[in-house]
Amino acid sequence: MKKKAIYVEIPIKARIDEVWEKSQNPILHEQWDLRFSSITYLPKKSEDDPQSFHYETKIGFGLKVSGWGKSIGTHNKEDGSKISSLHFGTPQKISPISEGKGFWKYIPNEKGTTFLTQYDYDVRYGYFGRLVDSLFRPLMGWGTALSFDVLKRWIEQRELPKTQYIRFFSTLLITVLFFFIWVYQGLVPKIIAKHPEEVAMLSSLSAMEMNTAVKAVGVVGILEVLFGLTWLLYRNKRHLHLLQIIVFPLLTVSALLADPAISTHPFNPVTFNVSLWILSILGFVLAKDVPTATSCKRSRKE
């Protein structure tokens, strides 16, 4: 199982000094880098010694991974570029990473700075560890790229990393919620159960015969499942939110026309659709200019 080093590159419209400060200062670095919850520099015996540091990463449910790192060399090139080499690792068995090496590189250009990193690491637990790493490594690459875009937006647009991550994860949760709702509503009551109320509502609105309405409900269910999958596959979530802002009031009116008494039922379409309509409006606002890993180059060949 061949492993590939993680490579991430992004252009930033800023001088090298600013990019260097926000990536080398541990207090600033931990604000934008999703891979670390805290970074603490350790005292050096002399200025010539490598800079050692301790890091922690919270992974949820009260669990965290802590490890060590060492800046083993910082080099200023004749063309004005800078390189900072790192050696890192963790003794904690919960982490698939045992030890690794990499570097940060800062290259000046006419528009600012090209900021890039490349790193690789060894895994523990033999074949099982390599199998886990086949899933973990892409996640690490994605997290690195997302973090780089957050840094870029912090420097260029002056939006704090914290607010960027709030928007990003809020948008992600709303996306997963709408995926679940559409897939569930299409699959369970329409395709699997063919619920009588679903059939009756469609029959009332379209004047279909009962057998035809049953088949039509199944078709509607398939369309809803496909739309739910679109929430995972389609990149511009604002388009989907805008569509729902239009559709949910129409669905509510249609349900009331089919059966006005349904508004008195518990968990009825009126309150359900209004809630989703408001959530779509919030999602439309939050999904504007969200940080994304796709803004980075992920290989030297790109």
Image: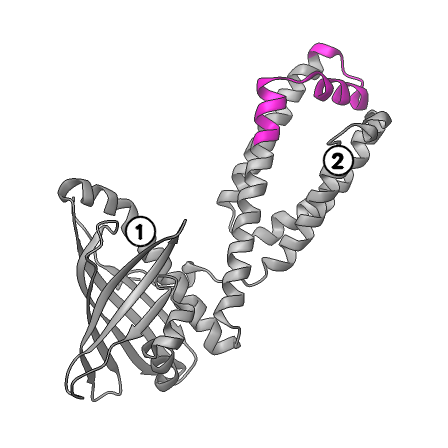
Which residue in the protein does label 1 denote? 138
- To which quarter of the image does residue 217 belong? top right
The total number of labels drawn is 2
Q: What is the CA distance from the residue labelled 2 to the residue labelled 1?
A: 40 Å
- x, y percent for residue 243: 67, 46
The crowding category of the residue bearing disc 1, from other C-alpha atoms within 10 Å (few below 14, some 14 to 19, many at least 20), is few
In this rendering, the answer to whether 2 lies above or below 54 is: above
- Which badge, 2 or 1, comes first in the chain's sequence? 1
Pick the residue in front: 231 or 144. Answer: 144
- In what quadrant of the picture does the C terminus appear? bottom left
Give the side of residue 296 with respect to residue 193, left or right. left
In this rendering, the answer to whether 269 lies above or below 144 is: above
The magenta stretch spans residue 180:
no
Badge 1 marks a residue whose secondary structure is: helix
Residue shown at the point (54%, 66%) measured from the top left: 163
Mark 2: amino acid: Leu
Mark 1: amino acid: Pro
- Range covered by the magenta-colored residues: 184-211
Give the side of residue 253 with respect to residue 94, left or right. right
Which residue in the protein does label 2 denote? 251
Residue shown at the point (42%, 69%) measured from the top left: 32
The image's mark for residue 298 is none
In this rendering, the answer to whether 70 lies above or below 256 is: below
The crowding category of the residue bearing disc 2, from other C-alpha atoms within 10 Å (few below 14, some 14 to 19, many at least 20), is some
**Tags 2 and 1 touching, CB below 8 Å:** no
- x, y percent for residue 225: 56, 31
